[in-house]
Amino acid sequence: MARLVFNKRSVEVKDGEPMKEYARELGVAFGCEHGVCGTCQIDIVSGAENLNAINEAEEDMGRDRKHRLACQCTILHGNVEIRY
Ligand code: FES
């Protein structure tokens, strides 16, 4: 089991699951959900190594390993703390 932490709250995440629904549950807002609008920009406080590799949509938005798009992230395992 992985864990997503945001704003002093956390939820358990199945290893290998997309972050989107869990982040939404914790209060992150989404728009397009396809890596285009930038609404879901998050900072990775810790656990960046526990996420999938950054993809082309994120690179096109100027994101990097510690600044991601929540709609494009998958939590592979372990704890990930985000700031929004
Ligand atoms: S919701 Fe639009 S980029 Fe993630």
Image (cartoon, rainbow, N blue to C red):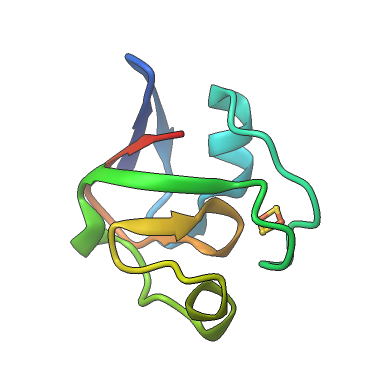
Tell me which residue sits at (40%, 75%) in the image: 54
- 22 or 68: which is nearer to us? 68
Q: Is residue 7 visible?
A: yes
Q: Is residue 45 above or below residue 15?
A: above
Q: Is residue 59 above or below residue 42?
A: below
Tell me which residue sits at (35%, 38%) in the image: 82
Q: Judge from the rendering whether residue 8 lies leftward or rightward of residue 35; answer left or right.
A: left
Tell me which residue sits at (63%, 41%) in the image: 21
Q: Is residue 1 visible?
A: no
Where is residue 60 drawn, in percent x and y? 56, 80
Q: Is residue 15 above or below residue 60?
A: above
- 17 or 84: which is nearer to us? 84
Where is residue 9 drawn, in percent x and y? 38, 16
Q: Judge from the rendering whether residue 73 lies leftward or rightward of residue 64; answer left or right.
A: right
Where is residue 15 drawn, in percent x and y? 37, 55
Q: How many marks?
A: 0
Q: Quadrant of the N terminus?
A: top left
Q: Judge from the rendering whether residue 10 lies leftward or rightward of residue 71; answer left or right.
A: left
Q: Quadrant of residue 25?
A: top right
Q: Judge from the rendering whether residue 47 lies leftward or rightward of residue 37; answer left or right.
A: left
